Amino acid sequence: MFPETTTGIQNSNIVIEDRHPTNTSDHTLVTANIPMKIDKTSTQLVKIYTRPNWAKCDTNIYTSTLKQELECESRRKESSVEERIKLLEKSIHKAGKKSIPKYRQLKSLKTVGKGIWNRKISEASRDSKNAHTLWKRKINSHQNADTEKINLTSKKRKLRQLQRQAYASKKEKFINDIMQASQKDSKTFHKLVKQQRSKHDTNTDILYIGNKAFEGEKILSAWQTHFETLGTPNFDENIFDLERLELAKLQNKIIPELDIQNKEITKATPTEIESAIRKLNTGKASDENGIVSEHYIHAIDVITDEITDIINQIFEELDVPQSLKNGILTPVLKKEKDKTIPGNYRGIVVTSIFSKIFETIIKDRLEPELFPSQNTLQRGFTEGASSLFTAFIVSETTMLYKFLKIVLELLTLDAEKAFDTVTHEIMLNKMFHDGIRGDMWVLLKNIYTNMTLQVKWGDQTTQHVNIQQGIRQGAKLSTLLYKRYNNTILNSITGSHLGAKIGTICVASPTCADDIALLGEPQDIQAMLNIIEFHTKRDMVKINPEKSEVLCTSKGKNYQQKAYTLGEKQINRVDKLKHLGITRNVKSKVNTDERLKTGRQTIYALLGSGLHARTGMCPLVLCKIWKTYVVPRYLYGLEVQICTKADIYELEKLQRKIFRQFLSLPERTASSALYILLGAEPVETILDRNMLSLFLTISRLDNAIEKKILQWELEIGKDFTESFINRIDKILNKYSLPNPKEILENPPSKYKWKNMLKKAINIYWSNIWKEECLIKTTIKYLTIQENPTENPHNIWKAARNNQNDIRKAEFKSRLITGTYIPQTAKQNCKIKFQNILELSVPRAERTLSTFYGL
């Protein structure tokens, strides 16, 4: 509990304090004076600027003021780029002050709890203090204080009662706000729901770098030391092969002098700038100058020409101002990691908004040139693709090798600080050999020269840290540059013809950003590891063998376990591993227990004990929270795995249980009634929809490796029953939709497919539920709405968002589902029981034990 600097705990002065007059709990205060050696810290109030309220912005005043400012003489081209950007941001703030009330006011945040206080509590607190004073006075004068004690207890109970009422009112208001926002204001709805999420304090009072501890104000210097070390290249010849670096440096010196470098950058157009501004994400944190995306978006017509002019000046001079090279880095703790170790944090950088626009334009120009040479197995940071595509390749390869009874190993590699250790010289050299020439190459070099960061921790920031290696996580160009950096490794593996294949399609190294997986037979895996070791040493990148894992996903006929090494260290062999959020095991089965645990934990973290209508929360709102926040986590990745009927039953079972709690209905309620009342989809349909969504996405991607896999599976026919295309065929037949071949050859538009699928699903379940309503007597009066999987029953649709209406709707739901037992039924049951009792047991022998059947 106490650090090693604590001294004299045994001599400490421990005192049990008297109960405070307003203390309504069962606990009292204990104080102890403990001598300790600690560094003195200065306590400061957290000072921040209020975010501009853009809903109250007078757009006409904002744009007209900004236009006037931009027309001033000081904006001429004679000024440097740095000065022009500063003047532009100054003009933006000036326009904001004139058009937005209380624009960027400095406010102080005090560290206070979320307690409540009102006039009644204030009066009750005063009465409790007075009663405590009278009681204490009698006790001190050794008089009988029984009456005063009773009075004090009464006053405390009254205070506690008022406190509980206030908390209940606060909770009721919060619930009403969520219900109202769920219908009218989606943004507020998500904001309120996220407030319910469990909050873990990621800030720490101590950091350890090696064996050295940093506390108090020294934590800031610890962060600075950590990121300075991370941003400094390691030239240890025992770890890396420096020949590639020396060659890159030599070539990079010669490149600017080559004739092929006489290629100027095409001037930016207002259309390009406008497109870049529209791509900015809104609602994000401001940059170090207090600018947010909305500043540019709300004045896009006025500000576009000025930004175009400034960026063209950069293209002409090839001089990137220092303000575009700076950034604010915030350490973000990785999931389930020790928060006292700096290496367990991911550094997320906030760059200036102007820098985002500038880098977006460069990225949009580079991507068309670089995309054709990108390895097809790299699915990270690629338009139209996602991490599920990588998982899809792994799953289909595993299923095929199981079907063919061939041994297949899956090996996942862990890259250490992948983004933070990219060597600038090697990166720029690779860009040149990838075809980026002329002034654009020089511009990229200037962007990554003298790059600096400031680390933000709490309300303080460090001095500028010089970054000599690494690309900023959060900057627009970083994703593109990283893909090019590890493209060499993927090309080498593909070119070696090692590893797994689906037909003639090489699927040896499916990759998502820095997550590289190796698939192959045992004789190929070690060779691929040797290729990776060779290139990572030359590229000065580290792979951690201790965190890398290998799993046999298909044992085939004659499986013999082999050990694999990276360098001199052996790769850990496991029975299950997690790859891209999906747990893989030896039998390639879905980990249902883990899914159920995730679903329960997520919904209880969001709603706590409020999983039923009696708390005042409308079941439709609860269902929306379930579908929006829980289902994506609960069922993530199952579209690329094979779910058995038993798996779907268990997943469905939890969803039905949660829905019964939402509706406050008993266990005996018919399952179909839950879905009809809430207008929800069964898990079976959600999985079908997700699989079809993935299938349609792949179908629209020409020349994608995933589409080639589907076409190959289509050609081999029905023999490979567990293939993705055969499973899709069954789903399409189930909903009477076109066959997979038609969709692959001529994929429908998103809008057309969405309507087609929605209609098919509603018809399918409407027919099933109508039959159930005819068979089951408990739901024979339950009418099925039009489009039942997305349209709640009128009982709940007509209920207003208040507790009285919700209680009425709950009562109606119990009546219509046959789960409410009226008094007449209870009386008839009682009469029947008495008749049976009279016939079977003589009156003289009737006892309580007889009644209970004991």
Image (tube, grey):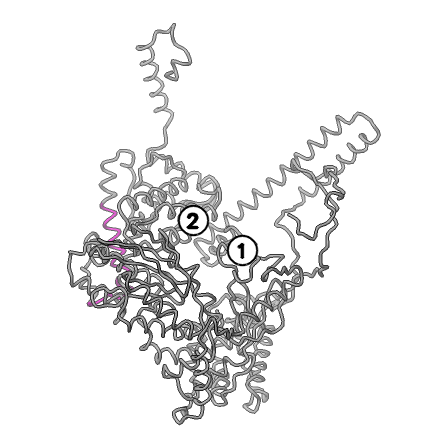
Question: Is 73 one of the magenta-colored residues?
Answer: no
* Magenta stretch: includes residue 746: yes
| Residue 850 shows in the view | yes
Q: Looking at the picture, tell me which residue is in the foreground, 123 or 592.
A: 592
Query: Taking 747 as reference, is 217 left or right?
Result: right
Residue 372 place in picture, x, y as percent: 31, 77
Q: Amino acid at mark 2?
A: Val
* In the displayed structure image, the side of residue 400 where residue 13 appears, left or right: right
Q: CB under 8 Å between callouts 1 and 2? A: no
Left or right: 758 as drawn, with respect to 332: left
- State which region is magenta: 745-767
Residue sitting at x 75%, y 29%: 148
- In the rendered image, the residue lying farthest to the top is 844
Residue 313 is tagged as none
Quarter occupied by residue 426: bottom left
Q: Quadrant of the C terminus?
A: top left
Which SS class for mark 1? loop
Q: Which mark is residue 338?
A: 1
Q: Position of residue 493 (x, y in %)?
A: 31, 70
> Looking at the picture, how far across and down is residue 387, in whole percent?
36, 63
What amino acid is at disc 1? Answer: Asp
Q: Of all residues shown, which one is farthest toward the bottom?
A: 259
Numbered circles on residues, count: 2
Between label 1 and label 2, give the one nearer the viewer: 1
In percent of width and height, residue 29 lies at 70, 41
Placement of 559 over or under 57, stated as above or below: above
Badge 1: few (under 14), some or many (20 or more) residues near its Cα, within 10 Å? some
Q: Is residue 805 above or below residue 490?
A: above
Q: CA distance from mark 1 to mark 2?
A: 36 Å
Which element carries disc 2, helix, strand or loop? helix
Q: Which residue is mark 2?
A: 621
